[in-house]
């Protein structure tokens, strides 16, 4: 199990035990983290799993790939550390990462 | 309901199945046709139709795959099954590929961004209240006209910042734009359609454009386009300006209108669901997604293959017309349990294809959801029952899936 901390827009934290092999989106949805809609079910086709990654401590989390970058073009309030949670596989390196949620999944 | 002009779908040879006929939608028989295609030939080639040869994509996950592969499946030109009339080509960003699509979409988006929507919520609630309070009680009337059209029209007028008293021009122009040969609806002659759009719609908005371009930037569509560096010259290409106007008017009009009508019709078709709603109005947000799935206000979007591609065991050739039938994907029993049934507390109700996927995914989905949510919140405060008293009259189109008339009676 890998410990992930989801931080809601109002600052509330929720600690989740995620399994290696899940995506970050699946870990959130399976644990009822509010604020991730995941309308497309993880196909990188809806951008309703937009999150901000605590990047300074986790620079290795990787960059947006092609379609992910295209989808993020049209999301709201995209920042340099924006990612789509369905495109991030859970790995042991992520232990303790904080994932920040946007105000709304537009 | 069965239309005598049509052979039963199970007696037609598979290769002769043509789901592009608008009358199949008007008579509500299309669902049986799609059920057969999903079962027997989910990626289906139709050689002869009013719109020429085309592929039909009918399963949920196949639709998702085509919709999110914009490199192999291009939107350039048109997203309707029928090609553009040669003498009247109106570019719009829904029918463009990157990078032009991206620039224009980005320019228009702030009109419907989350912050802007929360600003609009109390205004919408106030308008909904007025519309509902003015409705006749214990007397039959057409819900489409009195509620669905009126509410979406007022919303559109706000998004375009069109003077309130001019608002009825918007659904009128929307109807003109959608009554076209391209979707199998020839309510107006093509010349008449083009004349109205070019000689009435365009000058009206050109005037607004010039006013807005010379004023401080604001959050309506026209001002946003007139001030964005990527789109501020759009008025120099009047047909492209007109095309985008049609997109933004039609996009926000028929779709939301028919979801609103569909919500009333659906709760009448499935009275146990109406009971659930009365017992727990907290179900409204989930119900809104479910209604949008069940209704599927836009039946299809079309693409063109940019190269030969193997898909679902078939070979789609470069240049082939590929039609994603959202109305079928939303009834795919492998993804959605009991899909013909409206289930307002359905699990994962947001997981539907009505808004499409990928870079063209609906830009106005949250506006639409918000309007329907507020409408039902206010209905439940007022009315015990909205009873549908007659079979609805459906739209004759293979694109807009909705209702011309839905006669109801309200009891408090
Ligand atoms: C229930 C209501 C609605 C439905 C079912 C709906 C459906 C759709 C669909 C299927 C697409 C194409 C998606 C694709 O190709 O993958 C689309 C695109 C679009 N919709 Fe909606 N729509 C709705 C409401 C609205 C509203 C209220 C607006 C505007 C205020 C709007 C504006 C647009 C625009 C501008 C596009 C083009 C996006 C692009 O090409 O990037 N829609 N919509
Ligand atoms: S769940 Fe749709 S993009 Fe991630």
Image: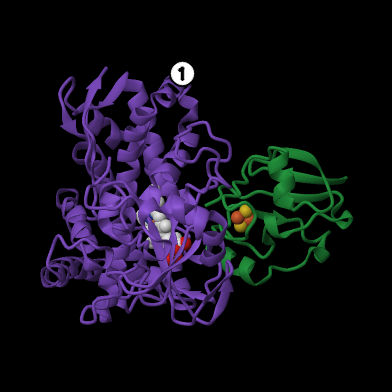
Chain colours: A green, B purple
Q: Pointer 1: residues within 10 angstroms few (<14), some, or many (20+)?
A: few
Relative to B2, does residue B250 appear above or below in the rendering?
below
Between B322 and B175, the residue placed more toward the observer is: B322
Q: Residue at x 50, y 35 (%)?
A: B286
- Residue B37 position in % (x across, y down): 46, 56
Between B34 and A62, the residue placed more toward the observer is: B34
Between B50 and B165, the residue placed more toward the observer is: B50
All told, the count of numbered labels is: 1
Relative to B102, does residue B355 appear above or below in the rendering?
above
Between A89 and B318, the residue placed more toward the observer is: B318
Relative to A25, does residue B21 appear above or below in the rendering?
below
| Ligand 2 image-quadrant field | bottom right
Q: Which image quadrant is residue B249 in?
A: bottom left
Q: Which image quadrant is residue A32 in?
A: top right
Q: Residue at x 27, y 43 (%)?
A: B2
Q: Residue at x 38, y 24 (%)?
A: B271
- Residue B112 position in % (x across, y down): 41, 54
For label 1, the residue is B279
Position of residue B59 in the picture relative to residue B382 (left or right): right
CB at mark 1 closer than 8 A to ligand 1? no
- Residue B352 position in % (x across, y down): 51, 48
Relative to B146, does residue B202 appear above or below in the rendering?
below
- Residue B123 position in % (x across, y down): 33, 40
Residue B299 in view, yes or no:
yes
Position of residue A38 in the picture relative to residue B341 (left or right): right
In the rendered image, which quarter contains the N terminus of chain A?
Answer: top right
SS class, disc 1: helix
Question: The numbered mark 1 sits on a residue in which chain?
Answer: B
Residue B298 in view, yes or no:
no
């Amino acid at each position: 199990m890998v410990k992930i901390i989801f931080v809601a827009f109002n600052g509330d934290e929720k600690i989740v035990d995620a399994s290696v092999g899940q995506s970050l989106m699946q870990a959130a949805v399976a644990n009822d983290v509010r604020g991730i809609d995941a309308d497309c079910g993880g196909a990188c086709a809806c951008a309703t799993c937009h999150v901000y990654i605590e990047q300074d401590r986790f620079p290795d989390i990787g960059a947006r790939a092609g379609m992910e970058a295209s989808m993020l073009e049209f999301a709201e309030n995209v920042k340099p550390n924006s990612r789509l949670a369905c495109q991030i596989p859970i790995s042991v390196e992520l232990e303790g990462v904080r994932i920040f949620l946007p105000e709304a999944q537009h | 309901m069965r239309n005598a002009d049509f052979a039963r779908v199970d007696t037609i040879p598979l290769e002769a199945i043509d789901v592009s006929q608008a009358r199949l939608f008007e008579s509500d028989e299309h669902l049986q046709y799609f059920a057969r295609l999903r079962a027997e030939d989910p990626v289906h080639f139709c050689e002869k139709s009013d719109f020429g040869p085309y592929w039909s994509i009918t399963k949920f996950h196949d639709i998702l795959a085509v919709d999110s592969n914009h490199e192999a499946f291009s939107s350039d030109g048109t997203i309707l099954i029928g090609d553009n009339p040669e003498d009247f080509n109106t570019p719009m960003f829904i029918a463009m590929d990157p990078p032009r699509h991206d620039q224009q979409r980005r320019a228009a988006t702030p009109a419907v961004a989350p912050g802007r929507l929360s600003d609009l919520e109390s205004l919408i609630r106030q308008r909904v209240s007025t519309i509902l309070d003015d409705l006749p009680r214990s007397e039959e009337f057409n819900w489409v006209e009195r509620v669905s059209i009126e509410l979406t029209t007022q919303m559109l007028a706000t998004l375009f910042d069109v003077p309130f008293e001019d608002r009825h021009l918007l659904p009128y122009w929307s109807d003109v734009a959608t009554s076209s040969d391209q979707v199998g609806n020839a309510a107006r002659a093509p010349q008449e359609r083009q004349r109205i759009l070019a000689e009435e719609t365009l000058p009206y908005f050109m005037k607004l454009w010039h006013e807005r371009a010379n004023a401080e930037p604001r959050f309506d569509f026209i001002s946003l386009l007139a001030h964005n560096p990527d789109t501020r010259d759009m008025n120099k290409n009047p047909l492209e300006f007109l095309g985008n106007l049609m997109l933004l008017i039609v996009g926000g009009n028929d779709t939301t209108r028919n979801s609103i009508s569909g919500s009333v019709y659906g709760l009448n078709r499935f009275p146990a669901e109406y009971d659930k709603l009365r017992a727990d109005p907290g179900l409204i947000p989930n119900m809104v997604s479910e209604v949008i799935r069940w209704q599927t206000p836009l039946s299809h979007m079309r693409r063109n293959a940019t190269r030969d591609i193997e898909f679902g065991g078939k070979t789609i050739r470069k240049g082939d017309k590929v039609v994603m039938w959202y109305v079928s994907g939303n009834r795919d029993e492998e993804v959605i349990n009991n899909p013909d049934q409206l289930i307002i507390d359905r699990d994962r109700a947001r997981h539907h294809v009505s808004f499409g996927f990928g870079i063209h995914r609906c830009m106005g989905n949250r506006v639409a959801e918000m309007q329907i949510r507020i409408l039902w919140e206010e209905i439940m405060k007022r009315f015990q029952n909205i009873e549908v008293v007659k079979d609805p009259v459906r739209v004759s189109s293979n694109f807009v899936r909705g209702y011309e008339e839905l006669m109801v009676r309200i009891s408090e």
